[in-house]
Every structure is written in structure tokens, then in C-alpha cells.
Amino acid sequence: MSTPVLSVDDLRTQFPTDRGVVRAVDGVSLSIEPGEIVGLVGESGSGKSVLAESVLGIVEEPGEIAGGDIRFDGESLLEMTDEQRQSIRGGRMSMIFQDPMNSLNPTLTVGEQIAETVRLHQDTGESVTLSAELKRKIVGAAKNGEAWRRAIEMLESVQIPEPEARADDFPHQFSGGMRQRAMIAMALACEPDLVIADEPTTALDVTIQAQILEELEDLKDEFDTAILLITHDLAVVAETCDRVNVMYAGEIVERAETRELFSSPEHPYTQGLIASTPQLENPDATLEPIEGNVPDLIDIEYACHFAPRCPEAERECFERAPEFRSVGDDHEAACLRRGPAGDRL
Ligand SMILES: Nc1ncnc2c1ncn2[C@@H]1O[C@H](COP(=O)(O)OP(=O)(O)OP(=O)(O)O)[C@@H](O)[C@H]1O
Ligand code: NI
């Protein structure tokens, strides 16, 4: 077995608030092998983004990682200095967010910001300065550099038409879909081992969304990058991911290979999610929403976080924490009412 690119072990991330401690990530374990696309799916408020922020080391104050470990290429990120983490971020590990306008610098041309990332993280022998843009305009020197060539190459590989001309555009001159492509180009420019993509296509219309997901898959193959794809959209997961983790109220409740998960979902929450999602093949089928809402993650006192919404819950579900049990090939669910006959409630 190879070393996983990412392995998260019993991670706990929490936010102290006036009303109590929000346990946004409450004992999560997951791992990603090199070159895999792993999905993280669950309703709004289940802790997906906080998990991503924990891995990236950008949890908002006063939030903190209160327990567990996160290993990247075998090394604990939590034991590293801020400096070490920073040098990994944007280089060997990069991110793509829902709104590229917030992640792109509006005052730098698209080509220049990709080139800057390359200069920062790869040893091109070119200096990194905030005034690189200015220098380039005045002297034009940076355009002959390796980093600038790399930027053009990346814009080309994410299918930006006329990449050499468009590299001189500012982010606001790009359409939404093109901005997201530029984000992807930037995220992949240093050939990272891992990309964390948090709702990367949610803001885009369906056609562009499909194109971008397809591109992400192609790029994954080209660069052998592992991707953690976070979404609340099951269709995106079904289309794109090799494996899936289903998250509910701060916990992973089920994990399996994608096809297995959709053909035989086991956890009542996953079953509920699938039943409440419109099916492409069968758009007229009646949808059955899961009743109730994700609880706010303060002081959850019952053992299975889904129990209050679960159609199958028994009293014991509120009292005894469910451990992961095997429910199929490489397929596990954390539910007392599932698993081998002898264990099942
Ligand atoms: N800075 C913060 N301070 C306090 N609570 C926070 C903070 N950030 C997130 N939370 C809480 O953590 C929980 C998980 O939020 P998170 O954004 O991770 O959910 P999500 O699964 O990404 O949802 P969505 O699909 O809407 O993006 C929520 O209850 C949220 O209110
Ligand atoms: Ni989120």
C-alpha cells in the first residue's frame, strides 16, 4: 500500500461561542490515496467546509483543532510550523473554492497571479515581489520567464481560448466559468499532490458545471493529483468521485466506492439523501425530503447524531454511539441498525 496523500484521524474542530461549543468536526477519519477523487457530501451545516479548512490550516479564529491528527504525505500537519504549512499550501496542496472572485486578486492579471504562484512554490530562479505586475508592464521582463510560460500553458490546459491574450486580462474581465477555470489553473500550476475543492461548481450553471467537472477529472489524470471534492450535490459526486464519504452533523456516517454507495446505500441518512435528490433518469419520481434539519452542533447529547430524524431509530440509538461496521465490499456505515446480523440492533 502506498502512503495516503491525506489521512485524517479522529479530527475534532470546534468553535467556542456565547451559546456553547460548536463541534463542527467531531471525530472524523478519512484518507485519500494518490490520484483519487474522494467525495465529501452532506447537507448544509454538516461540517464539510470546516473539515476542509482544518486540513488547509485556515480555521477561523476562535475556532481550533481540539484533537486528532492530519497527515499529508505521511507527515503530521499539526506538528509543523506555520511557515512549513504555508509553504505546502498553494504548492503541494492547493484549493479551489466556490467563489473565485474571493480567491483571485482583482488587481493582478490572471496570467500574473498564476505566474506568482509558480514563482512562490517552484524554484524558477525568478524573484517574487509584489510589484511583479508593475515591473512586467514597464520592463516586460517577466514574460520571458519560465513562470509566465507555465501560466500560459496552464490557461491552455483548462481550455481558456487564446490563452496568451487572455492572460493579460484582469479577473473581472473573465466570465464566471472562465474565472473558475483560472482558479483551477492556478491550483494545478505547481502540480500539487492534493487539491481540496469546496463546492467548486455550485455557483455555475449546469452546462458549465459539467464541463468544469470533466476538466477536473482530465487534469487529475494528467497531473496525477488527488482531489477532495466537497459538495452537497449527489449528482456531482456520482459523476466525478471514486469514493464517497457521507457527513452528517460533524461526523462521517458512511463511506464506500461511489457505485456501491449509490447502488446500495446503507445508512438511513444516506438513504434519505438519495431519496430526496431528483434523479436524472427518473425526473418525475416523487421526492421524499428528510424531515427536520441538521441540528446546530452545540451540545448534541444523543449518541447517534441522526437519531432524532431517523425513521428507524430505537431508544438505544440515542444512548450508544454507533461504530463503523462493514456493510459490503469496502463499504462501512456507522449505524447500530446495520451491519452483520448478530451485531444489528
Ligand atoms: N467561524 C465559525 N464560528 C462559529 N461556528 C462556525 C464557524 N464556521 C462554521 N461554523 C459552524 O460549523 C458548522 C459546520 O459548518 P460548515 O460550513 O462546515 O458546513 P458545510 O457542511 O460546509 O455547509 P454548506 O454545505 O452550507 O457549505 C455550522 O454549524 C457552522 O455554523
Ligand atoms: Ni461548506
Image (tube, helix red, strand yellow):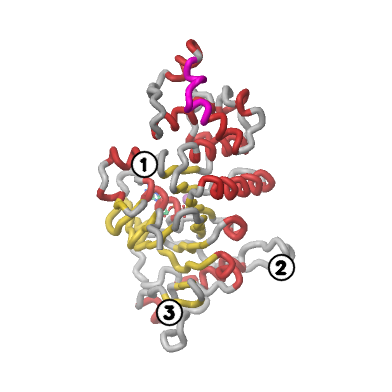
The three-letter code of the residue at mark 2 reads Ala
Q: Position of residue 291 (x, y in %)?
A: 55, 68
In the drawing, what numbered circle is on residue 336?
3
Mark with earlier residue (2, 3):
2
Q: CA distance from mark 2 to mark 1?
A: 46 Å
Residue at 51%, 75% in the rendered image: 329
Mark with earlier residue (2, 1):
1
Mark with earlier residue (3, 1):
1
Q: CA distance from mark 3 to mark 1?
A: 40 Å
In the drawing, what numbered circle is on residue 285?
2
- The response on whether ligand 1 sits within 8 Å of label 3 is no
Q: Is residue 145 magenta?
A: yes
Q: Are marks 2 and 1 in contact (CB under 8 Å)?
A: no
The three-letter code of the residue at mark 1 reads Ile
- Front-most of residues 131 and 91: 91
The residue that disc 1 covers is 88
- Front-most of residues 228 and 74: 74
Q: Position of residue 336 (x, y in %)?
A: 42, 79
- Is label 2 in a helix, a strand or a loop? loop
Report whether 28 appears left or right of 203: left
Badge 1: how crowded within 10 Å, few (<14), some, or many (20+)? some
Q: CA distance from mark 2 to mark 3?
A: 30 Å
In the drawing, what numbered circle is on residue 179?
none
